[in-house]
């Protein structure tokens, strides 16, 4: 299906039918193919599964960082839900998609039934990251600079970096070649996001102990921002790319929250 918001047109995969609906949000530098192994498993269990291509990854994506605040991105998710005829829906996200999912659930608890987040915790948890986390997040400062990241982050470099962080060759090649460079504005807009709402809906956060981007200390702090029922799952021996590399486990975790 296609949906529109803020003068932009987005593509979304729409599969399954008959039961509750779930929206799956991808991160950077992913696209909706990140959930390709998970969506059929959820649909087979009776869920309607919607997987949008997010702002920054579509041909008509805006160039200004102001268009990529979490509040602005939240309106895209709600536009998808509205145009798909969803009053309430389950929500899951990975990486930046997880950060956005926390924000959507915090801002609009009346729309979100449950939340499942993978790899990246609530943005509020980053207020006191610690030295180890700052070292792991050094690339974020680079990504916030104008122009330079687009020049430095060549397809070859990005593919190599994704492979080193545990992603398989097919996904690494796809993401590197997509050149969704306007999505770097998600990082640049971090300076404009000042409020991170607390989350009241039932929430599960899953983090792999082999994740090279997020420390365990930061992952454990996620629960401090959730007021509703909360579950924290540590996936032993698992790295950052949970939906791509462990789709069955990801689907099981989503279903444990939805059912």
Image: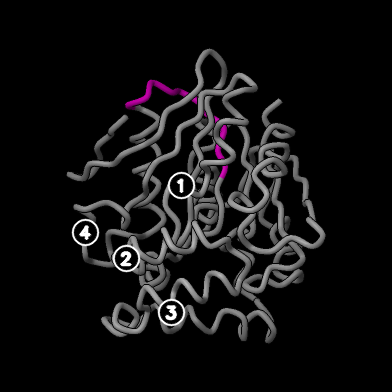
Which quarter of the picture shows residue 222? Answer: bottom right
Dot label at residue 179? 2
Q: Could you tell me how far apart the alpha carbons at marks 3 and 2 are, in whole angstroms?
A: 12 Å
> Which residue is identified by label 1?
33
**Neighbours of disc 3 within 10 Å: few (<14), some (14-19), many (20+):** few
Q: Helix, strand or loop at disc 4?
A: loop
Residue with the mark numbered 4: 62
Residue at 53% from the left image edge and 70% from the top image edge: 162
Residue at which label 3 appears: 157
The tag earlier along the polypeptide, 4 or 2, is: 4
Q: Residues within 10 Å of mark 1 (few under 14, many from 20)?
A: some
Helix, strand or loop status at disc 1 = helix
Report the residue at 59% width, 39% height from top.
38
Question: Does residue 99 appear left or right of residue 236 in this picture?
Answer: left
Q: Is residue 210 above or below residue 7?
A: below
Q: Please indicate whether residue 46 sits to the left or right of residue 67 in the image.
A: right
């Amino acid at each position: 299906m296609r949906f529109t918001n803020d003068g932009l047109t987005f593509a979304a995969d729409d599969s399954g039918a008959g039961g509750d609906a779930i929206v799956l949000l991808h991160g950077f530098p992913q696209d909706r193919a990140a959930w390709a192994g998970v969506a059929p498993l959820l649909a087979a269990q009776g869920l309607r599964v919607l997987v949008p291509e997010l702002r920054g990854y579509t041909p008509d994506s805006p160039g200004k960082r102001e268009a990529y605040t979490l509040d602005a991105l939240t309106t895209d998710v709600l536009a998808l839900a509205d145009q798909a005829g969803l009053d309430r829906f389950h929500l899951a996200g990975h990486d930046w998609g997880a950060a956005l999912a926390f924000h959507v659930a915090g801002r609009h608890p009346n729309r979100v039934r449950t939340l499942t987040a993978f790899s990246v915790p609530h943005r509020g948890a980053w207020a006191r990251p610690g030295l180890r986390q700052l070292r792991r997040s050094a690339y974020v400062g680079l990504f916030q600079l104008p122009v330079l990241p687009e020049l430095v982050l060549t397809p070859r470099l990005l593919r190599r970096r994704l492979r080193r962080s545990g992603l398989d060759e097919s996904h690494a090649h796809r993401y590197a070649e997509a050149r969704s460079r306007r999505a770097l504005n998600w990082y640049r807009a971090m300076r404009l996001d000042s409020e991170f709402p607390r989350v009241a809906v039932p929430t599960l956060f899953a983090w792999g102990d082999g994740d090279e981007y997020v420390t365990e200390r930061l992952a454990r702090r996620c629960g401090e921002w959730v007021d509703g029922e909360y579950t924290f799952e540590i996936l032993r021996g698992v790295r950052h790319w949970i939906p791509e590399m462990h789709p069955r486990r990801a689907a099981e975790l989503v279903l444990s929250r939805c059912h």
